Image (tube, rainbow, N blue to C red):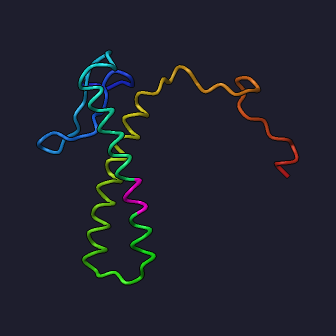
């Protein structure tokens, strides 16, 4: 099966065998789409909170190896989730509509002096 952008949505969870799950729908307001949106939001929130917690733990300076191992394990899981959210959202971006810049379609302009 060939997967093209905007045809299938990578869901923020894996199947029972660890394989990625995809949703095929044009209805972004359907039950599974809303569930996926809510799950992604929760995963991003958990990752942000875990990042803050990691800074607190590391600033303490008196950490046991088991504490640090648990922290790294949790952070690895959060990073996996955030990466999946980024991939899913990136696939859903429209490739036919490049971002418009104020100066037109040329993109940002730099003065010649910026190049030495």
Q: Residue at x 27, y 34 (%)?
A: 11
| Left or right of residue 91, residue 38 in this image | left
Furthest toward the left, the residue is: 16
Q: Residue furthest top?
A: 26
Q: What is the magenta segment's predominant secondary structure?
A: helix
Q: Residue 90 in the image: state x and y as whole percent.
A: 43, 34
Does 106 sit left or right of 67 as displayed?
right
Is 51 contained in the magenta span? yes
Up the image or down, 15 lies above or below 50; here it is above
Q: In the rendering, at what x and y percent does residue 19 appear?
A: 19, 41
What residue is shown at x 26% (from left), y 69% (from top)? 70
Q: Position of residue 76 (x, y in %)?
A: 32, 59
Stretch of the chain drawn in magenta: 48-52
Furthest residue in direction bottom, as rendered? 62
Task: Name the quarter where the N terminus is drawn.
Answer: top left
Report the front residue among 17 and 64: 64
Residue 15 x, y percent position in the rendering:
16, 39
Spot the residue most to the right.
113
């Amino acid at each position: 099966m060939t997967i093209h952008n905007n045809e299938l949505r990578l869901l923020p969870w894996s199947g029972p065998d660890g394989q990625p799950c995809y949703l095929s729908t044009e209805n972004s307001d359907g039950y599974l789409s809303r569930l996926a949106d809510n799950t992604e939001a929760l995963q991003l929130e958990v990752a942000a909170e875990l990042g803050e917690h990691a800074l607190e733990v590391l600033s303490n300076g008196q950490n046991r190896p088991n504490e640090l191992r648990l922290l790294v394990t949790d952070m690895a899981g959060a990073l996996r989730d955030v990466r999946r959210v980024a991939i899913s959202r990136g696939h859903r971006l429209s490739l036919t509509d490049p971002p418009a810049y104020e100066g037109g379609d040329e993109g940002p302009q730099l003065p010649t002096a910026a190049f030495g």
